[in-house]
Amino acid sequence: MTDPAKVRRHAERIRELVASVVRSQIKDPRLGMITITDARITADLRDATVFYTVLGDAAAQASTAAALESAKGMLRSTVGKALGLRHSPTLTFVLDDVQDQVKHIDDLLAAARQSDAEVQRLAAQAKYAGEAQPYRIDEDEDEDAEGDQDDDEGTPSATDRR
């Protein structure tokens, strides 16, 4: 069983190596404004997934994906030599759609804020269905009930003792 810390170190090293090679050695004109965001490797160190983002539209993303696919062999050999593993891990490139997810979450948060504001507006205009304090007891009725009860028992009330 492979040490998880070792797997994380190899994944980080793969991310750094791929970013370095893409920046300095790949001269493909199809390669757009690319950022290598993350790399993950399986526990057996055989398969690595490299996540990347591309600045631009869908055409720029497609052309960058094609450029990475064509440079996959060179990237794999560079990573294998640098890591010094028995088997060079196969590289799979995945477009990281973090920006789309961030936009979706921001839209959801904006909708939640709007509905909260609507609820606050409705709550400010709300009125009680009955009385504001349904459990309030009038003081006069309460004293009369205590006075009648005290007279029946023949004991002095709390106000008489003071």
Image (cartoon, rainbow, N blue to C red):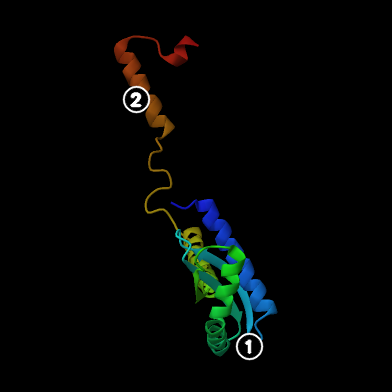
Number of other residues with Cα within 10 Å of mark 1, as a class: few under 14, some 14 to 19, many 20 or more? some
In the structure shown, which secondary structural element does the residue marked by tag 2 occupy?
helix
The foreground one among 91 and 103 is: 91
Q: Position of residue 19 (x, y in %)?
A: 64, 72
State how many labels appear: 2
Would you name the residue on which mark 2 appears? 145
Residue 111 visible in the picture: no
Asked if the residues shown at circle 1 and circle 2 are in contact, with their CB atoms under 8 angstroms apart, the answer is no
Q: Reading the chain from its start, which is encountered first: label 1 or label 2? A: 1
Number of other residues with Cα within 10 Å of mark 2, as a class: few under 14, some 14 to 19, many 20 or more? few
Instruction: Kindly report the distance in space between the C-alpha atoms of the residues bearing marks 1 and 2.
Output: 95 Å
The residue depicted at 54 percent of the width and 52 percent of the height is 5
Q: In the displayed image of the protein, which residue is found farthest to the left?
A: 152
Q: Of the residues shown, which amino acid type is indicated by label 2?
A: Ala
In the structure shown, which secondary structural element does the residue marked by tag 1 occupy?
loop
Left or right, 128 with reference to 58: left
Would you name the residue on which mark 1 appears? 28
Residue 40 visible in the picture: yes
Vertical side of 5 occupied by 106: above or below: below
Vertical side of 94 occupied by 60: above or below: below
Q: Position of residue 118 (x, y in %)?
A: 49, 66
Q: In the displayed image of the protein, which residue is found farthest to the right?
A: 24
Vertical side of 103 occupied by 133: above or below: above
The residue depicted at 68 percent of the width and 77 percent of the height is 23
